[in-house]
Image: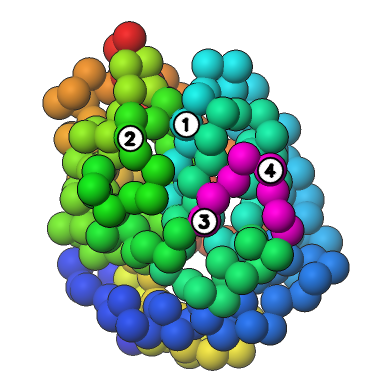
Amino acid sequence: MRYTGTTHEISYQATLEFFESRGRTASPEAPQTATMYQDQALAQRRDQCERETVVPLLGLLGSKRVLDVGCGYGRWAEVLAERVGEYLGVDFSAELLKLAEAKHFKNARFQRLAAQDISPTAVALPPPFDLFICSAILMYLNDSDVARLGAAMAAMAAPGARIYLREPMALSERLTLDRFPSVELKRDYSAVYRTRAECHELFGTPLREVGFKLVEDRSLYHLELCNRKETEQQIQLWMRDP
């Protein structure tokens, strides 16, 4: 089903089954397509664009501990693991984590943990963290858990910490797909596409309460890399006062 302009909760079990299937059938030559969905060429171009745009914003020289929420097959571990002190990637998909662990990244640990269950005591690497990666995760969480994740990050953040958020956001009004039959993905798909204002409110409120400020808030891709009419990939960079 498709819902616009209204709140509708999605099933986490359906989302887990979707990603377990994606992990089992991922192509070793183009693992990006397991989580980025586009054809191989576009997925690789988007991946490269995001790395080039975002890495300079992350303040890696000061990053001792990194928490990557929804790490998937290890996309950001490949970029960050050898450039920071310690890296922990968490994901709820065992199949995607198998792909990440098989790469044997230096300084990297992986843990099976759903985003909605993250807390200071649940993560395998003790906080505080200097950098959080949150890449296309809020779309798979219901509203209460988006706020809960923001609060968990706020509780685990070191002074001066940064949070990088990439999220496909609705251009005009909220859009929810609940077990929607996707021709492109060849199976049912569930996701919540919120507006920028909704993300600011749900995710950002607990961050602002502990001294985070939003310092980047913009589109990620150039026009030629955009292929959706109702949503657009947006990035936010939150920085906490030292």
Tell which circle, 4 or 2, labels the residue nearer the N-terminal end: 4
Residue pictured at 69% horizontal, 49% vertical:
105
Q: Marks 1 and 4, how far apart in space? A: 13 Å
Q: Are marks 2 and 3 in contact (CB under 8 Å)?
A: no
Identify which amino acid the numbered label 3 is placed on. Phe
Quadrant containing the N terminus in the rendered view? bottom left
Q: Which residue is mark 1?
A: 65
Number of labelled discs? Answer: 4
Front position in the image: 143 or 232? 143
Query: CA–CA distance between discs 4 and 2?
Result: 20 Å
Label located before the other in sequence (3 or 1): 1
Query: Is residue 37 at least partly visible in the picture?
Result: no
Q: Secondary structure at mark 4?
A: loop
Q: Residue under circle 3?
A: 110
Which element type, helix, strand or loop, lies under badge 1? Answer: strand
Label 2 SS = loop
Disc 4 marks a residue whose amino acid type is Lys
Q: What crowding class fits label 4: few (fewer than 14 Cα within 10 Å), some (14-19), or many (20 or more)?
A: some
Q: Which residues are magenta?
A: 103-110
Q: Which residue is mark 4?
A: 106
Q: Is residue 242 left or right of residue 219?
A: left
Relative to 2, say whether 192 is above or below: above
Query: As drawn, is 157 to the left or to the right of 71?
Result: left
Residue at the spot x=71%, y=55% of the render?
104
Q: CA distance from mark 3 to mark 1?
A: 13 Å
Q: Contact, CB < 8 Å: mark 2 with mark 1?
A: yes
Dot 2 crowding, Cα within 10 Å, few <14, some 14–19, many 20+: some
Please name which of the two marks, 1 or 4, marks the residue nearer to the observer.
Answer: 4
- Label 2 sits on residue: 127
